[in-house]
Image (tube, grey):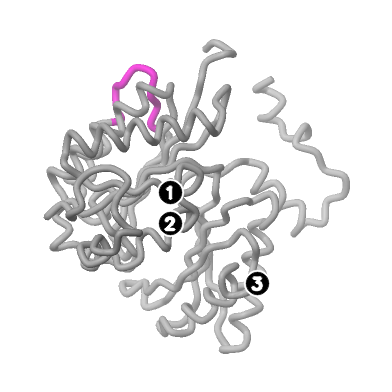
Amino acid sequence: MSNDRKIIECVPNFSEGRDLEKIEKIIGAFRGKEGVKLLDYSRDEDHNRLVVTVVGEPIALKDAVLEAMGKAIEVIDMREHKGQHPRMGATDVVPFIPIKNVTMEEAIDLAKQLAKEVSEKFNLPIYLYEKAASRAERENLAKVRKGEFEGMNEKFQDPNWKPDFGPDKVHETAGVTAIGARMPLVAFNVNLDTPNLDIASSIAKNVRFIGGGLRFCKAMGVELKERGITQVSMNLTDYTKTAIYRAFEMVKMEAKRYGVNVVGSEVIGLLPMEALIDTAVYYMGIEDFSLDQVLENRLME
C-alpha cells in the first residue's frame, strides 16, 4: 500500500437492524470492491438500525456507498419502520471522515458529489450537515433530523428547510438522507438497571452539551425492551476533549440521584485506539504513559 494513497472513512447508518436478509443485501455493496474495505458493521434490534464502518479511496468509496444506498431504498420501507433511534430515511446519515492524505475540504467535496449523484439517481431529498452544511443551522444533525420521517413533508414547507439536493418532497418509502463530513467520533452507550425511559432521558439531558453537560457530547435515552433496561446513548464528537471515561463517570454520577446503577456499556462501530488508551490510563492511574508503549503500535511502524 502506497504511503501517499488517499484514505477516507465512511460510517453510513441504515434504518434496518432486525431483518438479516435485508442487512446482508446492504452490506454486500461494500464487499469485493477494489479500493474499498469493509471494517465493521453492527446492528441493533431496539434501535432498528445498522451502522457500517468502511474505508477506501475517495471515488471507489463514494461509488460503494451509492450502491449501498440503492440497496437500502430497495429493501427498506420507512412507512413501516419503528425503532428507538431517531431517523428520517432508509439511509439515515452518511458521514465522510478524512483519515490519511485527505483534507476536510476533500471530504466535504466528496459528500457533495455523493449528495448530487444520489439525489439525481433516486429522486431522493438530501441535506448536507456538519462540516459540509450549507448554513449554520444545518450543522447539527439533531436539528436536521427533527420531525423525523413522519414530519419531514411539513418541515419542507418552511423555506429555511428545503433540502440541499433533490426534490422538495419526501421519498415515499426512503424518506430523507443527511450527508456530510466530520472528524472521528466515538459512539458510546451506557446501560442502566431501570426500565424507566424518563430516567434515562433525564440523565442524557444533563450529560449532553445542549443541556449544560459535556462540551463534545450528544446524548439521548433509549429503551432496551427485550432486556428490560434503558440506555444513555452518546456520541462523543471530539474524544480528545470529552473523554470516554469522563462521559461514563458523569452518567454514573447523574444516575445516583435516581437510585439507578450502571450495568454495562458498549462501543458501536470502530474508534481510535487513543480513546481507549486514555480511558485505561485514567482508571489505572498510569503515569507518563505513551502510545509508543503499545506493542501493536510499534509493530505497525
Q: Find out whether the residues at labels 2 and 1 contact each other: C-beta distance under 8 Å.
A: yes
Residue 209 in which image quadrant: bottom right
- Residue 33 is a magenta residue: yes
Tell me which segment is drawn in magenta: 30-38
Percent position (x, y) of residue 119?
23, 39
Q: Is residue 231 left or right of residue 248?
A: left
- Kindly give the residue lying farthest to the right in the view shown: 288
Residue 115 in which image quadrant: top left
Position above or below: 283 against 251: above
Q: Find out whether the residues at labels 3 and 1 contact each other: C-beta distance under 8 Å.
A: no
Percent position (x, y) of residue 264?
53, 67
- Kindly give the residue lying farthest to the front in the view shown: 159
* Secondary element type, mark 1: strand
Q: Nearer the viewer, residue 186 or 183?
A: 183
Position above or below: 106 against 254: above
Check disc 1 and report the residue beneath it: 129
Q: Find out whether the residues at labels 3 and 2 contact each other: C-beta distance under 8 Å.
A: no
Residue sitting at 68 percent across and 29 percent down?
297
Check disc 3 and report the residue beneath it: 250
Residue sitting at 23 percent across and 56 percent down?
18
Residue sitting at 46 percent across and 51 percent down?
135
Q: Nearer the viewer, residue 178 or 280?
A: 178
Check disc 2 and report the residue beneath it: 141
Q: Amino acid at mark 3?
A: Met
Q: Residues within 10 Å of mark 2 (few under 14, many from 20)?
A: some
